[in-house]
Amino acid sequence: MRSKILFYSLLVVLMLAAGCARTRIPSPRGMGEAPYPGGSPVDVLAYFEGIPYRGDGAINHHGDFTLFATPEILFSKPGLNCSGFTVAASRYLFRRNLLLNDMTIDRLGDSGKDSPYGQDWDFGYDVVLNVTEGMNRKVMLPFGETAQIEGSNGMTLRGFELHDRDAWRDVISRMRPGMIYLFSMNKPVSFKNYTLLHYHVGLIVPDDKGHVWLCHATTKGGVNKADITDQAALDRIINANPDGSLGPRSILIIEVPSRVGFSAALNTITK
């Protein structure tokens, strides 16, 4: 039995190494070696934590710090906005060397320059769905509610109210290790022809110690994370996004499975 486990352990290591070699996700320039793709999600968050905020900041698939809107501009120092962090970290979480152009696709053709709702009004909605395209996705809603991504759009699929703490407790209680959660915060607005904005995105990662880490890039804090099982930490996030006179803010959370790590792969093979 011992020799069998050792054999399968070696086999899994070789499989993971081969997978990483095929994925070829370069480390961001000037940041040192990144966690291996498909490894510990908590390690991925820790790797990006502390990167300063840069408006429109992103990392391209070559590992260069750049901008979404002007990818020909490259920076020698790190800097990310919320979408840039979400895309960059997702490359390692899902072993996909995501292209920035693919992440900004206007999925429903409803937020272009001539959109009656305003250009890029659903940018965050498109980003989280473009990142998770082709994955087994589930909308996380409280109290047994359900919703489908297919047939929905950024107006009709907004998630639950951001300030509903009971809803948060219910949703957090159903988050589990081995799954990754992408979110898009959205709010009603009234300027030009805009009525709604999906304005902020990020990641939520549960670990095997009972923590649930919400990680995002903010203007003052750069890339930072908080354990939202701690009510005080969750309150700080909620209070930083106050409701306005136009109505409550909401948060759309999408659940997807993370890539299989060493332990899960070994357990699967040896069963």
Image: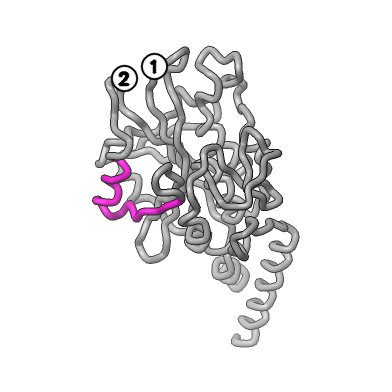
Picture residue at 42% right of the left edge, 61% below the top: 207
Can you give x and y, in whole percent of width and height, for residue 67 in the image?
A: 61, 39
Picture residue at 30% right of the left edge, 22% below the top: 247
Q: Which corner quadrant holds the N terminus? A: bottom right
The circle drawn on residue 69 is none
Determine if the magenta segment contains residue 229: yes
Picture residue at 28% right of the left edge, 46% below the top: 236
Residue 132 position (above or below residue 189) = below
Q: Nearer the viewer, mark 1 or mark 2?
A: 1
Can you give x and y, in whole percent of width and height, for residue 226 in the image?
A: 36, 54
Which residue is label 1 attached to?
190
Viewer-nearest residue: 131 or 257: 131
Q: Is residue 14 left or right of residue 205?
A: right
Which residue is label 2 attached to?
246
Viewer-nearest residue: 76 or 20: 76
Residue 46 position (above or below residue 257) = below
Q: Assign a secondary structure to mark 2.
A: loop
Can you give x and y, in whole percent of width and height, for residue 228 in the image?
A: 33, 52
Residue type, mark 2 in image: Leu
The region drawn magenta spans 223-238
Viewer-nearest residue: 209 or 59: 59
What is the crowding at mark 1: few (fewer than 14 residues within 10 Å), some, or many (at least 20)?
Answer: few
Residue 20 position (above or below residue 224) = below
Viewer-nearest residue: 15 or 200: 200
Residue type, mark 1 in image: Ser
Check if mark 1's residue and mark 2's residue have beta carbons within 8 Å.
yes
Can you give x and y, in whole percent of width and height, for residue 33 in the image?
A: 62, 65
Q: Assign a secondary structure to mark 1.
A: strand
Residue 92 position (above or below residue 82) = below
Q: Which corner quadrant holds the C terminus? A: bottom right
Outermost residue, front side: 76
Picture residue at 61% right of the left edge, 81% below the top: 5
